[in-house]
Image (spheres, rainbow, N blue to C red):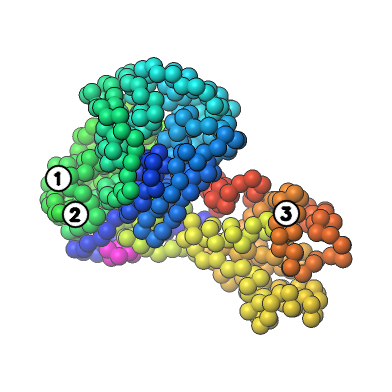
Amino acid sequence: MKIIKIIPIKRPISGEIKVPGSKSYTLRALLLSAFSITPVTVLNPLQCDDTDAMIDCLKNLGIEVELGKDFIKVRGSVKDIKNKKYKLNAHLSGVTIRLILALLVIVPGTKILEGESGLNKRPIGPLVDALRQLGATIKYLDKKGYPPLLIQPSKLRSKNIFVNGEISSQYISALLMILPFIKVSIEVNGEQVTKPYIDMTIDTIKAFGVEIKNNGYKSYELTSRNSYDAKEYSVEGDFSSAGYLFAIAALTNSKITVNNLNPESVQADKKILSVLEGMGNKITFHKNAVTLEGKGVLPVSVDMVDFPDQAQTLAVLAAFAKGQSVLSGLQSLRIKETDRLQATINELKKMGIRTRLKNDSLTIYGGKPKVAKIKTYGDHRMAMAFAVAGTKLKGMEIENPEVVSKTFPSFWESLASLGVGVNVASSKNIILIGMRGSGKTTILKLLARKLKIKFIDVDDLIVAHAGTSIEKIVQQSGWKYFRDIESEVIKKIPSLSDTVVATGGGSVIRPKNVNFLKKNGIFVFLDASSDVLQKRNIKSSKKPRLTEKKTVNEEIAILLKERIPLYKKLADITVSVDQKTPIKIVNEIITQLRLKNI
């Protein structure tokens, strides 16, 4: 398991930093670009796990998407979607699965929509109910009210629809974005939560040429009959990410200017500035930036129903404020990546901070928090919020710090650039095992990028050691000589840490190789069926044969019989790769690593 140790700021700092684009705006812009009648370039997007999930879904539907360094271009549109079968995975992105569901009911084809295990536990029933009122044919494939879903082609009817607004604003946002196609009114039952996110959706829709009237968050209707049409959309900076930096400034009496922020933004998490200003901190707005001059933290009483994503951050600050703080309006935190309320209570308790939970309000009895090793529960906001405490307390540790890739991939680098010490404790290597053609080389690089660690391919090390290609080694000296070089190379791997290692299919045949790899490694078996292996190995038929069998299919049959029992015996984690995108495979590996606390 990877752990980051944070070294506190010794004295107040004065610095500037740029935050990435808003996740919420990026995801909305990507979907609206797919609805647009012309190709759209999304500038300054946030490229993270959630946007990867949205792009993956769009591509699987046949919509062409191009990724650049500071842009994402959606070249295709919903018109490219054919009447065939699709299987879509939103991974762990709650926004993606809800927005995509609304898209799926207005396009042809039979679609299965699912997420990873954590996302499949988050409710989607109110949105399904609303879409069914239009005549959408949607079936639950497991537990009622939750993904996965089967969406079949259906003829929608023009009928005003009613939707519950008390659980998530994402249901309303999804419906608002398909309004130009269904042309009905949306009526809201109950009190609408997180209203600013509705404002963000309507704001983005307007930028794409369509106007929607908000009748006091009680109902919504089209006020223009335009189609979505944009050529370019620029994503503003993310106040959700900026909140952690403002909190650090307040806690450490520092002065931090956060660039790439729109002072006129309607983003929900901008509200944290008002709370911090109420504590006595000084806020200055610039043309495209905000400065917070920290004066310390005080107890607060604040209703967070409109900006719950900052609750963990304010809970951490409240732990340092002498007195009693009350954070209310937190009902939506129970259905996020984890039960954020319980997770926050658990970790504050480790820090010696007493809390009391009553209904949807959390009371925090602040004072003198102590250092702790923080469990992140697979939740990016747990990692970043409790990292704020590490800028004040010496010895704070954050487990599984790579979870920040969900929304703020450069978070740890941002802290370091401000002068916060960020040390990564050594952890085990991840050893990918499996047959030739199981995708180890592809998964190697993507997994290392997601985890932000190094990677090596044993085959590359062999080539470097021998000074020639694997094909020539085998042709000139045979497989035994190749295996001897392989063993020499593998001897050196235990000296590494925090590295993803791709092995050759036969690397683990020799017990001594297994012993070396196991010294500081976790085995991940990429399990591919014989059909998949046959197709992939036929395409790479130039590689040296492993047996004397005449055909690739015969060779694979022999090798599967010999090696699969060994792979299964050695594997700490097994992931099937059949009919899965590389992103899905990588996310499954990461999920299993976290579940096993590795």
Q: Earlier in the sequence, mark 1 or mark 2?
A: 1
- Judge from the rendering whether residue 9 lies leftward or rightward of residue 591; answer left or right: left
Q: Mark 3 highlights which residue?
A: 535
Towards the viewer: 44 or 459:
44
Alpha carbons under labels 2 and 3: distance apart: 53 Å
In what element is the residue under mark 2?
Answer: loop
Alpha carbons under labels 1 and 2: distance apart: 19 Å
Residue plotted at (44% across, 31% down)? 102
User: Is residue 417 a member of the stretch shown in magenta?
Assistant: yes
Of marks 1 and 2, the one in the foreground: 2
* Residue 288, disc: 2
Q: Is residue 76 above or below residue 401?
A: above
- Residue 345 showing in the rendered view: no
Residue 568 percent coordinates (x, y): 73, 51
Residue 134 location, quadrant: top left
Q: Earlier in the sequence, mark 2 or mark 3?
A: 2
Of marks 2 and 3, the one in the foreground: 3
Of marks 3 and 1, the one in the foreground: 3
Residue 382 percent coordinates (x, y): 38, 46
Magenta part of the chain: 416-421
- Judge from the rendering whether residue 273 lies leftward or rightward of residue 561; answer left or right: left
Q: Mark 1 highlights which residue?
A: 277
In what element is the residue under mark 3?
Answer: helix
Residue plotted at (59% across, 59% down)? 442
